[in-house]
Amino acid sequence: MPDFASSLSALTGESTLLYQEIARNVERTKGIKTINFGIGQPDLPTPSRIREGAKSALDQGYTSYTPALGIDELRSKVAEFLSQRYGDRILKEEVAITPGAKTALFLGFLLYINPGDEVILFDPSFYSYAEIVKLLGGKPIYVPLRFDETQGFRFDIEDVSKKITSKTKMIVYNNPHNPTGMNFDRKLTDELYNLSSEKKILLLSDEIYDHFVYDSGFKSVLSESGWRDNVFYVNGFSKTFSMTGWRLGIVVAKKDVINKIGVLASNIYTCPTSFAQRGALHAFETMDEVRSMIETFRRRRDAMYSEVKKIKDIKVYRSSGAFYMFPDFSEILRKSGLDSKSLAIRLIEDGGVVTIPGEVFPQEVGKRFLRLSFALSEEKIKEGVARMKAVLEKLADEKEKR
Ligand SMILES: Cc1ncc(COP(=O)(O)O)c(C=O)c1O
């Protein structure tokens, strides 16, 4: 076989999926039922109206190619929903439907990154950003988020500003944020938007968790009146409507950017799945169900926070967005001599509890943290945190005996 393309050597292959694999092995070999704080999707089924829509599309034989940018009705519905939510008049021609938000992100990078271009990312951030930037020959430039136990994570706009050079092509913003569970303050979103627009740098804004906000309002970059000049907006159906396996993502950008996506789409994947799009036409009719899911998640967040807070040596803050908690395990790592990866593996193997080590989310900051998802029942949350506590106590005992 010939060698793989040299660009592939940039990929680490690191992802959250590895820890699910270890968990499956532990379940098989030790017969333990694991509790999964590693999951990145709601545990509730897709609302029935959406499922029925897709089923009847299938029954009607709606199984052919669709337009590359998605069906007009769905693009219009997305445009209408976002226009109402953010107060601007977003046009159908400014919306593309993609096979999942990950594809939307990939297209965003593909459209703009030339080898050598710099892309500003927050540290930590969703692992795919850096991987794709590197695959395309770009260079991730990290701005560390600052952590404080009571406020959670924040960034300082001066830190971002200092990283801008003549090679900076793009800033990637993800709000609410994976893995930290922050819904960043409105002021920070404004500052970042203003900086990128002033410097004429593209702002790729991944707002896939936009409905998962718990304490204060959420500010979308689409509510900035000048967004068309420098925003590439990404969202999707996966999280809000519990549709991860349906693979439906959303891009909002200026019309000529969307047209370029059409060209790429027709060469790469032709179109998003036909009957899935027909199901998604009903998504915005289910907002009552979404709101009730968010209330459930708020209770889960509170349950997880109060349980984790009881564990000695962990610093935790109450997440304000997404469905992740990102506690600081530095003390435990220092005392046990483990790194976050080995600790996550110990938690799976000894306690049957799955977490994601922060170092999966590049680059440096995450190494002191573990990501815990609260997308599971309060009962499981309590049981999982109790298991985690037991493993940590055992680790402390082992250290004392040594
Ligand atoms: C921040 C972020 N963006 C994008 C995605 C990908 O979403 P999709 O399943 O629609 O590809 C995820 C999924 O975990 C995510 O956490």
Image (spheres, helix red, strand yellow):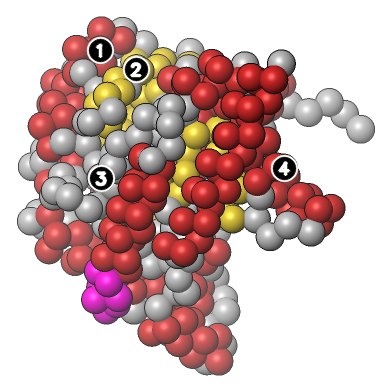
Q: Is residue 177 left or right of residue 38?
A: left
Asked if disc 1 and disc 2 are in contact, CB closer than 8 Å, the reply is: yes
Asked if disc 2 and disc 3 are in contact, CB closer than 8 Å, the reply is: no
Q: Which mark is residue 320?
A: 3
Which comes sooner in the sequence, label 1 or label 3? 1
Q: Secondary structure at mark 2?
A: strand
Quickly name the residue at label 1.
159
Above or below, comparing residue 363 to residue 312 in the picture: above
Alpha-carbon span between mark 4 and mark 3: 30 Å
At x 92%, y 32%, the residue is 1
Alpha-carbon span between mark 4 and mark 1: 39 Å
Alpha-carbon span between mark 1 and mark 2: 7 Å
Decide whether residue 49 is among the magenta residues.
Answer: no
Question: As shown in the figure, which amino acid type bears the numbered disc 4?
Answer: Glu
Q: Which mark is residue 349?
A: 4
Q: Is residue 1 left or right of residue 15?
A: right
Question: As shown in the figure, which amino acid type bears the numbered disc 3?
Answer: Ser
344 or 400: nearer the viewer? 400
Q: Secondary structure at mark 1?
A: helix
